Amino acid sequence: MEIERKLIKKASLEKLYDKLKANGNKMFAPINKDGKTEYHYNPSFGEVTFDHIQTVQSVKNTVFPKIENLIRFKSDKEGTDVTEVDLNQIPNAVVWGVHPCDAVGFIQLKSIFMWDYKDEYFNTRLSKLAVIGLSCSKSDEYCFCTSVGLNPGATQGSDILLTKLSNGDFLAEIITEKGKEIVSASADLFEAAPQEAKESNLAEVKQKFSHEEVTKKLKTAFEHPFWVENSLRCISCGACAFVCPVCACFDIQDETKGKLGKRLRCWDSCGFKLFTIHTSGHNPREVQSQRWRQRILHKFSYMPERNQSYGCVGCGRCSRACPVDMNIQEQLIALEKI
Amino acid sequence: MESIRKKAKELLEGNVVQVIIGYENGTSNKVRAAFIKDASQVDRLIYDERCVQNLAVYLTKHEVKHSGKMGIVATIPVMRTINMLIAEEQIKPENIVVLGIGEDGKLLEFADLHVMEDYLKKAKIELSAKDKEAIEKIKKMSVQERFEYWSKALETCFKCYACRQACPLCYCTRCAVECNTPQWIPVPASANGNYEWHMLRAMHLSGRCVSCGECGRACPLDIPVHLLTMHMAEESKKMFGVDAGFAMKMDSVLSTYKPDDKEQFIQ
């Protein structure tokens, strides 16, 4: 559908937030607490921040929780009874104030979870989620959305995208049918589109490399010494994968208590040594350079080829979170030149 | 800084070591580990107050240790870790050259590691005021308050294991959390699973932790997990008189048994 532009004043925005909350939506919004910004469930509007650069964690847990209960079971001598999880119990939710990079994260996740096998858990959560985006007015040196084909005001992935204007009011771009429904249900809160240009209110993020060029280079870079040289300091933790809005690898675990059990899907990371170890003891990715290579290749080579989507939105979270300065932007800039 | 570069150059040119593990400038005003294999690259090495990562974690890393003999820029916590790794037979003293950094930030050259042991025995080693204060605050809590404090602090943990991976003494090729026959620790990052993981980590480091604080610094969610191991280090010292990392020979507190143990239950 064609994007519709409207104005919403700050006071009306509070009303919209409260109304969505009152309608039973689980609100997930960023707040500043203890010197950092993170998303929390159901904060009051007053607590919600509109000028943060980026949260430590992404919003992927709204559609791909760190623990997803897949089935319940009961096992005894008679056999095993399996109970499906009632997906209807998943509440409607609104993820509020996500930056354009994170909104695109949902599209990239969809390219994984809805690729060949349609994942019901993911799909149900996504279908019950409304995405209220917020253009970036600030950025830092870790941000590189413009190098992966996005920008601080990109509309993809958001149902409604808000952009803070110079007087504190907001431009609302209505992007999807879901967004349109939200606006129609609160039509009195929206006004005619403002004159002010959206672009003048966006952060500047300089393009540092071309993701298409990186993809081209990666096709023949598998055996390049780059990987060993640039990953000696990587300590093989999963911090980068867990804060990433697109990393979607998981592990299936059964947890039992007596005769009752649950089958759970938990976040996993290709950085872990155990990730690819075979029962024979053989590990095809035995050393960290192979695992780091996998991380980059998956996002910038395998995904574009198989999923017609990149696996990186340029949010910079992995580089901010990395305890040993494995800065993905720095490495992608270098890879473009190999 | 110049003295480190000079020493590194000398060691590499003389083929005494094949790699120098030190610090270099990283991105965004960060510093990071550098692995210098060529004497022409020694100018990358730096040292200032930002250089706090415990580099000893790389001494047992496959791709680093296979470079050959290693020279390592070592602050006091790193020196203590080296002693621990030798005591636990994870590294051989003859494979290591220590470029020590003293309390004044100046380069210390040790003729051998016994000289390093002597230096450590005389060095003034204390927890930072911030860590001390945090530990005291938690110790003053009632059991219930303390349980609530840690439950809340550990709730957000998503088990990325940065704490474990950053720790040079968490070198097990297969961590207890990765054993599944039986499964000791739940894998999901649930409230109980998180609690059990961090308690296990603290216990496995009791009497071994050198209080470098690397686990806490590594945590992307700023969970102060280092306070757990630092507290256990204090307790080990108090109860067993063992302070980790001051000698290359040391018995492990929690896996050493004596017939004349002061505790009745063990006899």
Image: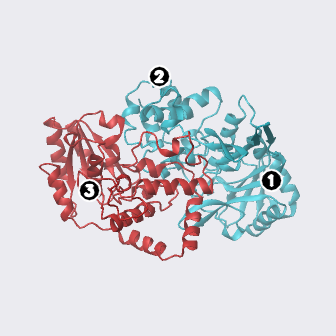
Name the residue carrying label 3. Answer: B75
User: Nearest the camera: B123 or B45?
Assistant: B123
Say which residue label 2 marks. A220
Q: Nearer the viewer, mark 3 or mark 2?
A: 3
- Residue at left offset 43%, top offset 74%: B136
Disc 3 marks a residue whose amino acid type is Thr
- Marked residue chain, label 1: A
Amino acid found under the numbered disc labelled 2: Thr
Which percent across, then down, holds residue B35?
A: 30, 41
Tell me if mark 3 has few (under 14), some (14-19) or many (20+) residues whose alpha carbon lies within 10 angstroms of its own: many
Can residue B149 be seen from the camera position used here? yes
Please tell me the numbered disc located at residue A64: none
Q: Give the colour of chain B.
A: red
Q: Quadrant of the image for the N terminus of chain A? A: top right
Instruction: Tell me what hue chain A is rendered in.
Output: cyan
**Residue located 16% across and 37% down the image:** B16
Q: Position of residue B93 (x, y in %)?
A: 21, 43
Q: Quadrant of residue A190?
A: bottom right
| Disc 2, SS | loop
Picture mark count: 3
**Residue on which disc 1 sits:** A92
Question: What chain does badge 2 belong to?
Answer: A
- Measure the C-alpha gap from mark 1 to mark 2: 45 Å
Q: For this rendering, which residue is in front, A277 or B176?
A: B176
